Image: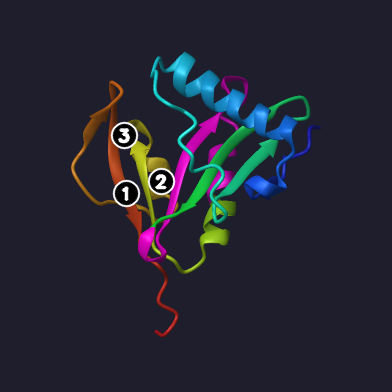
Amino acid sequence: MPQTPVPRTASFAELDARTFHDLLRLRIDVFVVEQACPYPELDGRDVEPDTRHLWLDGGDAPLAYLRILADPGGVARIGRVVVAARARGGGHAGRLLTAALELVGDRVCVLEAQSHLVGLYARHGFAVSGPEYVEDGIDHTPMRRDGIDRRR
């Protein structure tokens, strides 16, 4: 029986060249090639000191990936959520989101969901926070998860 992959987390400085290459390859394979969205994948945010990269290691290549960015005002932004075609349907995105939200903790967290995945994010406490829009030919929906008020 195959083991459930455990989420791995690193800052850019902690990533070795091979791992960063493999993570970028996954992002490009899905977002640029499969979804036919030619855009500048290297946006400069991967190297920011507060960015955290999370992924599930599939042995020979990552199964799934996301990154957490630090936006102004202490807001966390989850982005680049991706699952390799060969690994879809295995709960990997949900597993990574759970790990990401543990890192985010009590902070407000936002993301721009592909609209067909709004239900996935809603199951993790996100709510629609604005109107649907089209980016790179794909419907997106802004979503937000408010920080947890522990004073109650």
Instruction: Identify the magenta region.
Output: 72-97
User: Which residue was labeled with disc 1?
Assistant: 143
Q: Which quadrant holds residue 40?
A: top left
Q: x and y percent of residue 128 in the render? A: 27, 49
Q: Secondary structure at mark 1?
A: strand
Residue at far left of view: 131
Q: Position of residue 133 (x, y in %)?
A: 21, 34
Estimate the x, y position of residue 141 in percent, counting from the top left. Answer: 28, 40
Residue denoted by label 2: 121
In the picture of the structure, the residue carrying the numbered disc 3 is 115
Query: Element under label 2?
Result: helix
Sequence-earlier tag: 2 or 1? 2
In the image, what residue type sits under mark 3?
A: Ser
Q: Nearer the viewer, residue 89 or 55?
A: 55
Q: Is residue 91 visible?
A: no
Marks 2 and 1 close (CB-CB < 8 Å): yes
